[in-house]
Image (spheres, rainbow, N blue to C red):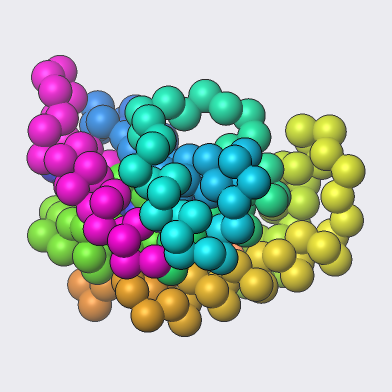
């Protein structure tokens, strides 16, 4: 079984995808980490994430299999990931990697679950199940704010809210593979749902 989970930041995609992976014994790929890797490499080499040449150089040089850098989750990298993600050269370079992951999962896995922005629309249009999570902007900013605070980072809610809005705008309006639900996706608003309720609704959609 191949499952696509898409949606904007702070909506609970990662948590849901990880839990589904565990529940159904599926290989799991957080595709945002690929864009974050590119962004981190650009920032660490004094590049500009809004300069296409800097970004494409980073794509050619990085090792896209190492995901253990704490900096990948920082707010600066979140913004830069959304900036590098507008370039078709980046998206093309990551396309096959994501698709191969979904097709070549190794035993004992029984399939794969990928979370991102364009999984159901572009990367895996034939996925068996597609889930698109949404939630109010303020709720998502609050979740992100609490997450960063719990990691001991010095952040303000207003700054995070502005960041979430900027990222939404960029991810939704870019020309190549913008964030949007696939026409055949199960759309779920998680604003007022607990993690358990989101999981329960996702499972009942999958098993319908
Ligand atoms: O899911 P995330 O917050 O880690 O993603 C970081 C950025 O990467 C996101 O703002 C846009 C980009 N991204 C993308 O364009 N396509 C994906 N499938 C996943 C992430």
Question: Does 193 sit left or right of 141 as displayed?
Answer: left
Q: Residue at x 65, y 72 (%)?
A: 166
Q: How many marks?
A: 0
Q: Residue at x 69, y 51 (%)?
A: 76
Question: Does 155 sit left or right of 7 as displayed?
Answer: right
Q: Residue at x 29, y 49 (%)?
A: 94
In this rendered view, identify the residue nearer to me: 49 or 163.
49
In this rendered view, identify the residue nearer to me: 65 or 99.
65
Give coordinates of residue 13: x percent, y percent. 46, 51
Work out whether 48 lies above or below 177: above
Give coordinates of residue 101: x percent, y percent. 20, 37
Give coordinates of residue 23: x percent, y percent. 32, 31
Give coordinates of residue 171: x percent, y percent. 49, 70
The quadrant of the image that shows the C terminus is bottom left
Magenta segment: does it hold 110?
yes
Stretch of the chain drawn in magenta: 87-113
In this rendered view, identify the residue nearer to me: 134 or 42.
42
Work out whether 68 lies above or below 122: above
Magenta segment: does it hold 184?
no
Quarter of the image where one finds residue 60: top left
The quadrant of the image that shows the N terminus is top left
Q: Residue at x 35, y 57 (%)?
A: 90
Taking the image as drawn, is residue 191 in sight?
yes
Quarter of the image where one finds residue 116: bottom left
């Amino acid at each position: 079984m191949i499952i696509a989970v898409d949606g904007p930041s702070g909506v609970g995609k990662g948590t849901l995808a990880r839990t589904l992976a565990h529940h159904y014994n599926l290989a799991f790929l957080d595709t945002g980490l690929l864009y974050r890797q590119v962004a981190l490499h650009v920032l660490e080499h004094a590049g500009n994430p809004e300069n296409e040449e800097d970004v494409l150089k980073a794509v050619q040089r990085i090792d896209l299999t190492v995901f253990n850098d704490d900096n990948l989750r920082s707010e600066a990298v979140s913004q830069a990931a959304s900036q590098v993600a507008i370039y078709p050269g980046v998206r093309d370079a990551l396309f096959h990697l994501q698709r191969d992951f979904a097709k070549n999962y190794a035993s004992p896995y029984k399939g794969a679950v990928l979370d991102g922005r364009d999984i159901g629309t572009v990367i895996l249009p034939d996925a068996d199940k597609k889930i698109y999570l949404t939630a109010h902007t303020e709720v998502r900013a609050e979740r992100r704010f609490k997450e960063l605070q719990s990691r001991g980072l010095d952040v303000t809610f207003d700054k995070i809210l502005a960041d979430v809005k900027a990222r939404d705008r960029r991810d939704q309006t870019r020309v190549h593979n913008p964030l949007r639900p696939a026409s055949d996706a199960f759309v779920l608003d998680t604003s007022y749902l607990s993690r358990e309720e989101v999981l329960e609704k996702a499972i009942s959609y999958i098993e319908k």
